[in-house]
Amino acid sequence: MAISVAVWSITATPGEPTVISPPGDIRITNIALGDVLADESGRTTVKLSYRVPGSNEKDSDDEEEEDDEEEDEENKELATTVLCSLTPGKIEQSTVDVVLAEDEDFLIEVVGKNTVFLTGNYIDQNPFDQDPYGDNEDMSDEEDFDLQEVSSDVEVNPDELDVPSDDEGRFEEIHEEETKSTSKADSKKRPRESDAMETEEQEGKPSKSQQKKQKKLKAENGEAVPATSEKVEEKKGKQDKKKSEKEKPKAEAKILQGGLKVVDHKTGTGPQAKAGDMVSMRYIGKLENGKVFDQNTKGKPFKFRLGKGEVIKGWDIGIVGMQVGGERLLTIPAPLAYGKKSQSGIPANSTLIFEVKLLGIN
């Protein structure tokens, strides 16, 4: 299912063919006459020329022989179709459903005297339940990054947690038991009770009778007296460690233009992204209730030109200043997102939350 990402439009003038090389997939949905008509009775036709898929594939042995004829062959590969014909007073707009693929070349021509306006959307055709594009080859030069493995909790950085694994504690306990079992195995005979008591006294361990007495003892405040001081110190050390983890500083939030809230989880390296740069992004888009409405976490990254209105305004503002490898949380108010208009999976007047990562700047 394709998701509309941003509005796209173009003006086509008679006698001036328009070449389109979209940075992302585009769906044209409407073609209409303008408010000013050069010919109030004549018909205006809109044509689309495109390269036929697969027509430029050649055998490797023939490529070297046909290099000189490449230009002539490309002209033969083009196909032309009519999108619509408009007549003032009769048909002044037409609804269409045509997808222009990313990084392909298309030619729009207008036959007639009236200027026409083509409108549509940038779309993301990645289904939510599948790996985008089902192709990992595009990630050979990109860092494999899965935002689903990153906690959305702003206050805790998983890399800073230092919790001992269960295996470490288990190995230590087994080591102690093995030491005890080894010492017992050295003597197959059961020692006399008096010898056992002398051994325990020499090792500094309390006898069984002394341990029972310590369990019955009560401190002045009514709490039981611990059998050893080592356990108390160990418990105190764990409490101090948890306290220090809670006192770690939270990520600082910045409020930008229009109330856009920005929190940097990770600072990247290299030059900062600026208006006009072509950026490659990973992202997860959520509503305030935590529902995911869009995401790009694997496969081909989402690319757009920063600051040119190809995405919502909150992205054009919030991505500026990021560095490659940087991770950022954007909380975008409705006026900087889709405003009063509802989108697929996004109610009107919704505040949007994006977890984004910058993969590259071109």
Image (cartoon, helix red, strand yellow):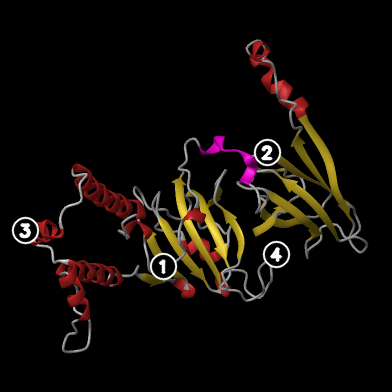
User: Bounds of the magenta span?
Assistant: 131-139
Could you give the CA–CA distance between mark 2 and mark 4, rounded to whole angstroms? 29 Å
Which residue carries the number 4 mark?
344
Residue under numbered circle 2: 105
**Image spot of residue 7 (x, y percent):** 66, 60
User: Could you tell me which residue is drawn at 46 percent across and 47 percent down?
Assistant: 359
The first of marks 2 and 4 along the sequence is: 2
Q: Tell me the quarter of the image containing the N terminus.
A: bottom right
Circle 3 packing at 10 Å, graded few (<14), some (14-19), many (20+), is: few
Q: Indicate whether residue 64 is drawn in magenta.
A: no
Q: CA distance from mark 3 to mark 4?
A: 78 Å
Is tag 3's residue or tag 2's residue first in the polypeptide sequence? 2
Q: Residue furthest right?
A: 90
Q: Which residue is mark 3?
A: 202
Q: What amino acid type is highlighted by mark number 1?
A: Val
Mark 2 burial class by Cα count in 10 Å: few <14, some 14-19, many 20+: some
86, 119: nearer the viewer: 119
Q: Nearer the viewer, residue 63 or 190?
A: 190
Q: Residue 9: horizontal and vertical position, in percent?
A: 69, 56
Secondary structure found at label 3: helix
Say what secondary structure mark 1 lies in: loop
Q: Looking at the image, is 301 positioned above or below residue 63?
A: below
Q: Which mark is residue 291?
A: none
**What residue would you read off at disc 1?**
154
